[in-house]
Amino acid sequence: MANVHDQITQEITQNPVVLFMKGTPEFPQCGFSGQVVQILDYLGAPFKGVNVLADAELRQGIKEFANWPTIPQLYVKGEFVGGCDIVREMFQSGELAAHLSDAGVELKQTAKA
């Protein structure tokens, strides 16, 4: 599975914010993925969505990569942030916007949760 590991490493290295999700940002195919997309859109954070449903090897590989059993998974500047519950809690506390800003991710709006 080194191939998938390399693919994941490449995605999180080349893109400041990556969401491994079920479906696409335009058409999430799971409620949890949809929630994280809505949060990132609300903050105006540019991100790349990677559809794990398109590749079974990737879907399993991302779980092993982060040692995290569920999808979606959010990465900021190559660092695993968490899944839907963690992202939602960080958003509600204002921590997610601060984390993104501290990582140099330019947010398009300044509204507070």
Image (cartoon, rainbow, N blue to C red):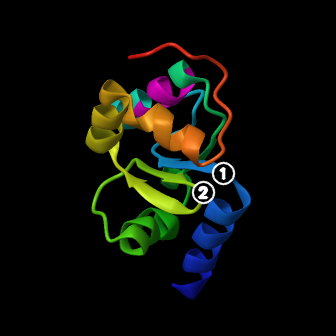
**Which residues, given as a range, are shown in magenta?**
36-41
Q: Is residue 13 magenta?
A: no
Q: Residues within 10 Å of mark 1 (few under 14, many from 20)?
A: many
Label 1 sits on residue: 16
In the rendered image of this protein, does residue 56 appear above or below residue 18? Answer: below
- Residue 68 is situated, as x and y percent measured from the top left of the image, at 31, 64
Q: CA distance from mark 1 to mark 2?
A: 5 Å
Q: Residue furthest bottom?
A: 2
Q: Residue at x 45, y 66 (%)?
A: 62
Q: In terms of depth relative to the viewer, which is nearer, 10 or 54?
A: 10
* Dots 1, 2 in contact, CB < 8 A: yes
Label 2 sits on residue: 77
In the rendered image of this protein, does residue 20 appear above or below residue 87? Answer: below
Left or right: 88 as drawn, with respect to 53:
left
Q: In terms of depth relative to the viewer, which is nearer, 80 or 31?
A: 80
Q: Residue furthest top?
A: 111
Q: In terms of depth relative to the viewer, which is nearer, 44 or 59?
A: 44
Q: Residue at x 45, y 26 (%)?
A: 39
| Dot 2 amino acid type | Lys
In the rendered image of this protein, does residue 16 appear above or below residue 46? Answer: below
Q: Residue at x 34, y 48 (%)?
A: 83
Left or right: 49 as drawn, with respect to 65:
right
Q: Quadrant of residue 29?
A: top left
Q: Residue at x 63, y 78 (%)?
A: 6
Q: Is residue 39 magenta?
A: yes
